[in-house]
Structures are given as structure tokens and as C-alpha cells.
Image: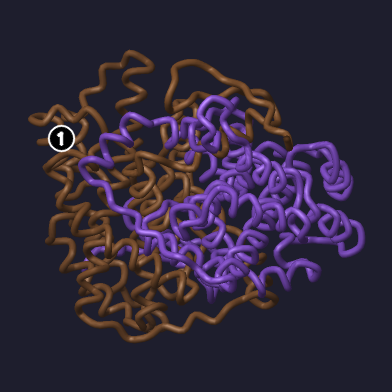
Chain colours: A purple, B brown
Amino acid sequence: VHNGIEYGLMQLIAETYDLLHRGAGLSNAAIADIFHEWSYGPFGGFLTQITSDVLRVKDAETGQDLVDLVQDKAKQKGTGKWTSQDAMDLGIPIPTIDAAVSARQMSSLKEERIRAQQSIGRDVRGTEQSQEWLDHVRSALHLAFLISYAQGFSLLDAASTEHGMEIDLEGSAKVWRAGCIIRSKLLEPIREAYLHEKVVDNLLVAPAFQQIVFDGDGPLANLVIFAANVGIPTPCLSASLAYLDGYRSARLPANLIQAQRDFFGAHTYERTDQEGSFHTDWGIH
Amino acid sequence: VHNGIEYGLMQLIAETYDLLHRGAGLSNAAIADIFHEWSYGPFGGFLTQITSDVLRVKDAETGQDLVDLVQDKAKQKGTGKWTSQDAMDLGIPIPTIDAAVSARQMSSLKEERIRAQQSIGRDVRGTEQSQEWLDHVRSALHLAFLISYAQGFSLLDAASTEHGMEIDLEGSAKVWRAGCIIRSKLLEPIREAYLHEKVVDNLLVAPAFQQIVFDGDGPLANLVIFAANVGIPTPCLSASLAYLDGYRSARLPANLIQAQRDFFGAHTYERTDQEGSFHTDWGIH
């Protein structure tokens, strides 16, 4: 689960880098400065700091930014995949992590992507953005990081219950604060939430994090909108927004799905106004 | 894989229904008319038709639209999950289907969602939309349907190669044209593409489908933008857009991920300008 969260955070950073680079026309050096600054902020940590470091390294041979010469095929050892597969078995939605797994797989289809760009590609036209826009990107990434952690912890919680493992969630946050890849300043308030607040549902609704949601939801939506407008793929930012907006929707359109399932498979449905299981002949009357 | 595609199509329809209903303020009867019309169009089929039928059924007891009384918890028997898990093992991205699986899981968290709406919920403010907007929604859904099929067929293709199954993709499209849940008019051109065009990559780049991409990519992006603006979750529409924009991007930001992996795990990286595997000390210099 640590590695699943790691996949999520890394892909969120990669998408943000893409938006800053291709979307806003910033240089690697400028983006390194931004991530360096963010690494001292409330979601800063190992991955934000090494992003800054990586973007500054020059290739010894050519003098170019080395990151530009790195092939855009992300490999994986399977731990993110394993997290997603387990979450599906446990019935716990972790779509940000799922999207990070499939984004790595998409990256590996390099030859196909080159051919697809030639036949159905779209020009990405980036334009310079304001400091205010950058502040919004920071708030969006802050929230998206929280969403990745929230998905991971909700999975740990469910696995603990399902398998009778009695996982110490506060202890998990505590050990993850140091010495591991997903360490960041967000893990201390997560630890405190599990210690003091008796988190029963999701971290997103814990009082300590509601302000991050309120500060970040508009910026996250706006970043997804920005990406859709310029044509930059943001699978994990989009999945994070959909997770948030789904989780805080008391009513989702799954009633239609359940009615369809009852239509074609007599799978029955529940009603909002009565207890029990129901079946209807939904054919044209 | 049939059922995985089915999960994708059903969730795409559910999101579209939500956008038309809560986003554009249309009644169930009006949405039934729209899906009825679409069911005669180029992506029409069983699921679009039964959507129309379901939306017209009245509850015998209360006289209300029955769909409004159906609980918004979508159950699953596990075949969509199985498709996603297998695709992850084969390294094939099928994010629309993954998102449909996790959307059903999200729907089942009904009690948590009710509590979350109370603490961090957001009002969805729908507004009346034009006929032109509806035409764009149709083009977006047409393309999103194609993307679901394309992901399913790419998985079949990879599984066939990996397991030496010699799956007849044209034959698969042929049998799916009739008597199954995902039958739609799109399957005939898919069959023809496999028969005549020697599809080597993805259906999205087959000549027969490029016009659907060009007609639908703007509308699909605009629908994701609309949803983000009003706060309606669209996990599958968003995942479909990200899949399209990722697949047709010759360059993705996975270079940053691979550089980070080399930074913290010495996993090595490939270069764009030289053959071989490389490792760099990425720490601050």
C-alpha cells in the first residue's frame, strides 16, 4: 500500500510537471525552483524534493537538462498493480492509484504513441501563467496528495477489518513520516488524526483536513479544466477530482446502473423509500 | 472482457445521465427521449435503448419515476474487476474500465457519502443547456463508447498474444453485434476494421474511426470541463479523455518518473539519444 500511494504521488507530480512545462511554458530550472519551494510547505517531502533535484541535473556529455534525455517509459515492479488488484478484491475504490498504474502502462506503449500522434495527435499550446495560477496549482496538488494518502489508508483500514489484522493506522502514518519514499509533512497531521480524532470514515472528512479540501477543490477542478483545454492528459489529477466529488455526493447515478442490471439480469434493486429487494419488468409498457 | 466493456459503457451512460439531469436540469422523460434518439444513431444499441426504457417506467405505488426510487448502490458480480485485474497483469491500460469498477465500489459507500456531503459537500448548480450542447454530448459519448471498446479489444489482442490463444478479433466483434449486452452499431465498423484494415495498433487510430476522434475530442474535453465546473463526478468520461490524450502523446512526463525511480532505487533509465541502460547519481551537485 505504501508503494501504491507512491505510484499515485509520483504520477500526480509528473502530471503537474507536464502542466507547468508544456502547459505553462516553464523551464526545468523554473519548475525545480517551484518544487523546491513546495518541498518546504505543508505537503512537502522526499518526492517533491527529489523532483527539484532531478530537474536540475545536467547531462555530462551534452550539457542539456538530463531529464529531457530520459526516455518517457516508466517501468514498474508490480507493487502498485498489486495494491490496485487487492483493493478491487476488497471493494475499496482507489482510483488515483489505479490511474497511476495504467499511466505507467500507457507510457510503455511508446512506439504506438508516436504513431498515434502522427495520425490523431493534437497540438498542445501552452501559454504563460500568473503567480496566482501557480498558487492554485500548489493547492490542487496539496489536495491531490491528501486524496492519494486517503485512498491508501482507506484500503489499509478495510484490509485490517477484512483479514482481522488490527493494523495500527496511527503507527503506519508514524513510520511513514521518515525513511521511506512517501514521507511528507502531510503524514504528521494524518498520524494525529488517527491518534486523536477517531477517524471513522475517510481522511478527507477528518476535521484537520477539511480546510485542505475547501482550499483545494476549486483549484483542482480548475487544473483539470486547464489540462482538458490544452490537451495534456491528467489521469491521476482527474481521478482524484472524481474521487472527491464522488465521495462527497450523497446521491450518485448508480441508481440507473442498478435499474439496468435489474432490466437485463434480474439482479434486483433496493429502494430509497422501502426496505427489501425488488424486481421490475422494465421493458416498454 | 465483454463484461469489462459493459461496465465502461454503463458508467459512461450513468455519468451522461447525471450531467443531463443534475447538470442541465432535464427531466427523466426528456433524457429518455434523448437516449431513444441516440439509440438509432451510430453508437446506438442495447444499453442506450434500455436507458431510455428504464427512465420511462413509473412506480406502480407512488406514480413517481421508478428510477428516482432506486437506491444508488450499484452491485457487481466481479467480472469487471476480473477484467481490470487481468489487464494490469498483462500491462495493458484500460483506465475507463478500471474507473467503472471503482465507481461501483464508490457507489456502495452510501452511508459514508451521505456523511461526507454533510461535512464537505458541494452544491451542484445545473443550468439549462442548448441543443448545440446536447449535440456535443452525443459526440462525446460516441467517442467515449469507442474508447471503451478500443480498450477491451486491445486487452483481447494482448491476451491472445501472451497466451497464444489466437483470438479472432473480427469474430469477437461479429458475435458481439447481436444477443449480448454491449451490442451496438459501433461493432459493425469495428468488425470491418479488423477484417479489412489489419488493425495493428489501437482501434482509435484505425482510419474508419479517426473522424469519430476528430468530431468527439473537443466535445469530450468540454464535457469533462462542464462536469468539473458544476461538481459532478465523471470518473469514466475523464479517464476516457486521459486515455485518448495519453495515447496520442508521443511524449509523456514518464521521463520524470523514470528519473525519480533511478534516483531512489537505481532502477536505471533509457535515453532518447543513445541505446542502453543508464544510471545517474541525481543527488544535489
The x and y percentages for residue B224 are 39, 65
| Residue in the picture at 8% in, 30% down | B196
The x and y percentages for residue B207 are 13, 41
| Residue in the picture at 58% in, 64% down | A137
Image quadrant containing the N terminus of chain B: top left
**Which image quarter: residue B122?**
bottom right
- Chain under callout 1: B
Q: Is residue B114 above or below residue B193?
A: below
> Given the current orientation, which residue lies at the most extreme left position?
B196
Q: According to the image, label 1 marks what residue?
A: B174
Image quadrant containing the C terminus of chain B: top right
Kind of residue at badge 1 = Lys
**Which image quarter: residue B188?**
top left
Residue B90 in sight in this render: yes
Residue B104 in sight in this render: no
The x and y percentages for residue B190 are 16, 39
Mark 1 crowd level (few <14, some 14–19, many ≥20, 10 Å Cα) = some
> Given the current orientation, which residue lies at the most extreme right position?
A196
| Residue in the picture at 54% in, 25% down | A61
State the residue in front, A15 or B18.
A15
State the residue in front, B108 or A93.
A93
| Residue in the picture at 51% in, 56% down | A26
State the residue in front, B153 or A134.
A134
Q: Is residue A273 above or below residue B237?
A: below
Decide if residue B115 is on the left or right side of residue A243: right
Decide if residue A85 is on the left or right side of residue B69: right
State the residue in front, B215 or A251.
B215
The x and y percentages for residue A234 are 47, 53
Q: Secondary structure at mark 1?
A: helix
